[in-house]
Amino acid sequence: MLSLKYIVIPNFFTENGQSQAINLSYQIFGRPLYDAPIVMVNHALTGNSNVCGKKGWWNDLIGKNKCINTNVYTVLAFNIPGNGYDENQSNRIENYKDFTARDIARIFAEGLSLLKIHELFAVIGGSVGGAIAWELAALEPDLIHNLVPIATDWKSTDWLIANCHIQDALLNNSREPLVDARMHAMTLYRTPESLTSKFRRSENTNTIFNVESWLNHHGKILNERFNVSAYKLLNQVLRTVDITRGRSSFSAVASRISSNIHIVTINSDLFFKADENWETYVDLKLIKDNVTINEINSIHGHDAFLIEFGQLSKFLAPIFKTEISCNYETVLKKCI
């Protein structure tokens, strides 16, 4: 957190016309900014900009000599405003229903513009982070060379909206909102098979099953490190993903995106279904040649993008594999 930097956007207007001052925080990893190709990483719902290094949540994927090699790339990660990572209460956002996923993408685009970044080698994100990547690509169709949405979708499905509705009810009505919302979410992030494999109906005591103890633990841990306003906002962002809203069909919007699109889905994901991603891939292949899809095979459901690093790294290696060079122009030509 000591390396957090800020961009001040004094008068941001949300899609519904509300004015809000935004303090957009971010972190830089790897090579200095403007010295190498830039990989932008979007965090998931309860994540943050600390993607690698000490307590980095994607250390298995990003770092020195890792799949996304910080010896080669500049890694940029914004915090979704209001996520509470900087522990500054004045940066919390209470009017969460004024924000959409597209608003967050617009804030990120403004941050990039103020940093004078006009091209990105890649934007990668899992879950809601990947959804914001989709929104950014639709907003700035020539900005990103490689769009890598993982365990996500370009729209919130009815199933996702329904579960976000339940999450919102828990966050507003429960006596322990973070605990209860997190326990509900964990059952969606995993699968019945994953929980069976992990617990096999084992008991912690005569009165509690280990699966219940596990859920209680996750609720308690999130309650200690997160805040309710952040959860409400991120849940609202999750339910409002739709790159076609107010535009036209998916094919028409996607046809304008110049990026190479590399979809990574998960066969057992109960949150962002693999079938939806395969349908997206088929639709894209009708209008674009530069699109691929890979599927993580796992019993662990949505959370597999944070578990199955061997498979994920294998899928991403062709995108990020490049000869190490200290010369920016040389690296850029090899990467793009």
Image (cartoon, rainbow, N blue to C red):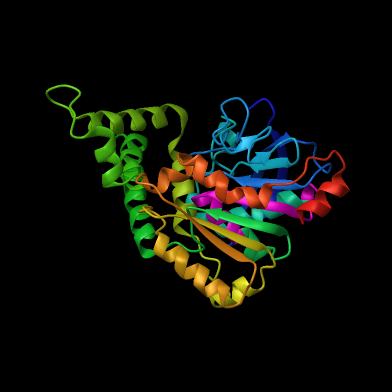
- Is residue 116 in view? no
Q: Residue at x 72, y 43 (%)?
A: 8
Q: Residue 35 in magenta?
A: no
How many marks on residues? 0
Q: Residue at x 45, y 34 (%)?
A: 227
Pinpoint residue 324: horizontal percent, then vertical percent. Answer: 78, 40
- The residue sitting at the top extreme is 205
Q: Residue at x 36, y 64 (%)?
A: 158
Q: Residue at x 21, y 35 (%)?
A: 200
50, above or below 265, in the image: above
Q: Residue 133 in magenta?
A: yes
Between 197 and 172, the one nearer to me in the picture: 197
Locate the C terminus and report the quarter of the image it occupies.
bottom right
In this image, 20 relative to 332: left or right?
A: left
Which of the 4 image quarters holds residue 5? Answer: top right
- The residue sitting at the left extreme is 206
Between 59 and 333, the one nearer to me in the picture: 333
Segment colored magenta: 114-135
In this image, 150 relative to 289: left or right?
A: left
Pinpoint residue 161: horizontal percent, then vertical percent. Answer: 38, 59
Locate the N terminus and report the quarter of the image it occupies.
top right
Pinpoint residue 268: horizontal percent, then vertical percent. Answer: 36, 52
Pinpoint residue 203: horizontal percent, then vertical percent. Answer: 17, 26
In this image, 89 relative to 118: left or right?
A: left
233, above or below 242, in the image: above
- Is residue 136 in view? yes
